[in-house]
Amino acid sequence: MLYSGPMTNAATPDTEITLSFGNQRAVVSPWGASLRRYALVEAGGSEIDIVWGYSGGKHKKGGQGDVLIPFPGRVAEGHYTFDGEPFQLERNDKEGPNAIHGFVRTLPWQVSRAEAHCGSFDIHLEATQYDSKGYPFSLTIQVTYELGEKGLSCSFDVRNAGTRPAPVGIGFHPYFTVGTLSIDEADARIPGAGVLEFNDKLTPTGNILPVAGTEWDCRAFRRIGGKKFNHCYVQLDRDAEGMATASLRHAASGRVIEVAMDRSFSAIVAYTGDAIADAPRRAFAIEPMTCASDAFNHPEWGLKRLAPGERFSGRYAIRHRIES
């Protein structure tokens, strides 16, 4: 494990850690517990990017590699009710009057495990710290990245460290590339039978629309083309082991990236990055989420209600292969 960045006790946006295993390299950071890069190193030393990433905090674009806790996606108007009590979150969504993607992606985490192929980051959210921000709940969180024979895995563990039940959602925001200049040239496979219907403020109406017979049905590989994805898929198809797998493919080169999610994840956001300044549609976000967007207002969409002391954990993995 190799560190770069300022040599201080606290993480900064420029603190980065390189993980290595065989020909795999991943760059992660205790700033937000972010995944900043994942690549394969060829025999000649050239690198093949799998995760479209960045180096140094000022070079980040959009939500690249962010960890989305305690809520992924948007909370409509930043408002929600839990156990009969109303709360108001900060409206920090640049595309509408909503709260978006939680708090932890802009916070320094502690490095709790440091090995050549594996790193873990920990953070504690104290209820009193976030009471004024609309989330008066205490959480202890760990995120672990690990390289191995089958690729890169990312796991999370969240514990309610408070004295009252807490609403919790977990999400991750990696962008993927199969080497094309534009994501339009790639094919996507998203194992969701339904998508949330959104209004003009990018928040759900409460309806789930079937994808069958529509251009958003990507249960088999489908060319992205000029379509603007910013869709939350639900009703995920799973294999015999309970894994739901989304994929990105470049048919001409045979490159395929697979993102496999365990049963803790019940939703996937697919996004073509159209709102990213200076680099729209460079890569395709496949966002594993334990609940759908705005689940704080629709708890039936996978919102986790953690009792005091209760834990919630899960894992997703990234694999790369060449299709013959």
Image: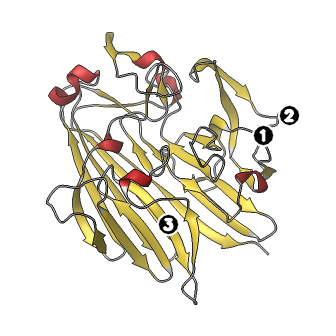
State the image coordinates of residue 34 (x, y, percent, origin top left): 38, 54
Discs 2, 3 touching: Cβ within 8 Å: no
- The residue located at (78%, 40%) in the rendering is 217
Badge 1 amino acid: Asp
Q: Is 220 in front, or is 109? A: 109
Neighbours of disc 3 within 10 Å: few (<14), some (14-19), many (20+):
many
**Within-10-Å neighbours for mark 2: few <14, some 14–19, many 20+:** few
| Residue 165 or residue 258, whichever sits in front | 258
In this figure, which residue is indicated by the disc labeled 1?
A: 217
Mark 1 neighbour class, 10 Å CA radius: few under 14, some 14 to 19, many 20 or more: many
Decide: is 172 above or below 98.
below
Secondary element at image label 2: loop
Residue hosting label 2: 213
Q: CA distance from mark 1 to mark 2?
A: 7 Å
Q: SS class of the residue under badge 3?
A: strand
Question: 181 or 177: nearer the eye?
Answer: 181
Q: Is residue 218 left or right of residue 22?
A: right
Quarter of the rendering occupied by the C terminus: bottom right
